[in-house]
Image: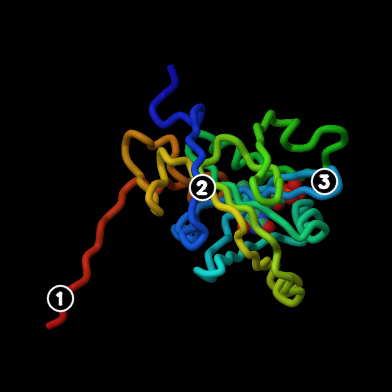
């Protein structure tokens, strides 16, 4: 029997695009996946954020040294995959080695990373994650060159309904293995375990 909240039985559900920003609003580490001309790759990125509701747009920082950037620039597409506590070692590993060093096996093969095709762009999406955004790059050469920042339009969004439902995260003790990862540095991650519902202060 699988543990409660195990990624084995992900319930992948489409997320309305105007709500897609909610998937990364709380600053989770993402896995950026990309492909071009039969080559594919995946890396970790702690720096991503929503920048527009409609059309849904995001920004992500992808360093010039990365192999992923090569594929993103060549294809004009990328995907953000949201890893969870259950796959923390996978998230850290793909952020610690470069796909450029692969001879005959890419990171997916080398580490046995399951994947499926994105519904809009056919990008390689990572199994075991709890959210997936496929994006088209909006070319901003200055931002890319000066700040390593890529602006993108989200064209498909999905989430695991066990932890994201009705347009928001539902972070509970019984789905802790599915909570997103928040990088503190050097492979140490925090989980967004405690939530607090705010109400508006009454005006005096
Ligand atoms: C938790 C974590 C977060 C990271 N965040 C970023 C990031 O936001 N931007 C970036 O360019 N690199 C980031 N990195 C580093 C890349 O993931 C790393 O350079 C990776 O090996 C690049 O792989 P590639 O050359 O196969 O594309 C991060 C690494 C880790 C472990």
Q: Quadrant of the N terminus?
A: top left
- Quadrant location of residue 201? bottom left
Q: Is residue 188 left or right of residue 151?
A: left
The secondary structure type at the circle numbered 3 is helix
Q: Quadrant of the C terminus?
A: bottom left
Q: Which residue in the protein does label 1 denote?
A: 202
Which one is nearer the viewer's eye here, 30 or 163?
163
| Lower position in the chain sequence, tag 3 or tag 1 | 3
Mark 2 C-beta to ligand 1 under 8 Å: no
Vertical placement of residue 137 versus 163, above or below: below
The secondary structure type at the circle numbered 2 is strand
Pointer 2 local density, CA inside 10 Å: few below 14, some 14–19, many at least 20: some
Q: Residues under labels 3 and 1: Cα distance? A: 56 Å
Q: Residues under labels 2 and 1: Cα distance? A: 37 Å
Q: Which x, y percent locates residue 65?
A: 78, 57
Label 3 vs label 1, nearer the camera: 1
Res 14 label:
2
Vertical placement of residue 110 versus 195, above or below: above
Res 100 label:
3
The secondary structure type at the circle numbered 1 is loop
Residue at 87% across, 36% down: 103
Residue at 69% across, 28% down: 112
């Amino acid at each position: 029997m699988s543990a409660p909240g195990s990624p084995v039985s992900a319930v992948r559900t489409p997320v309305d695009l105007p709500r897609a920003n909610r998937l990364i609003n709380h600053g989770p580490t993402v896995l950026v996946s990309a492909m071009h001309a039969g080559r594919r790759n995946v890396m970790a990125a702690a720096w991503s954020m929503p920048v527009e509701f409609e059309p849904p747009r995001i920004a992500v920082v992808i360093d010039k040294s990365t192999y992923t950037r090569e594929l993103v620039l060549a294809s004009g597409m990328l995907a953000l995959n949201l890893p969870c506590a259950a796959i923390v070692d996978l998230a850290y590993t793909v952020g610690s080695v470069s796909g450029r060093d692969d001879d005959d096996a890419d990171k997916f093969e080398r580490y046995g990373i399951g994947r499926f095709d994105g519904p809009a762009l056919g990008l390689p999406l990572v199994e075991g994650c709890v959210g997936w955004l496929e994006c088209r790059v909006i070319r901003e050469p200055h931002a890319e060159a000066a700040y390593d920042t890529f602006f993108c339009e989200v064209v498909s969004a999905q989430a695991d309904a066990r932890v994201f439902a009705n347009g928001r995260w539902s972070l509970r003790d019984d789905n802790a293995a599915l909570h997103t990862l928040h990088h503190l540095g050097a492979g140490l991650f925090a989980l967004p375990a405690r939530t607090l519902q705010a109400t508006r202060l009454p005006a005096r």
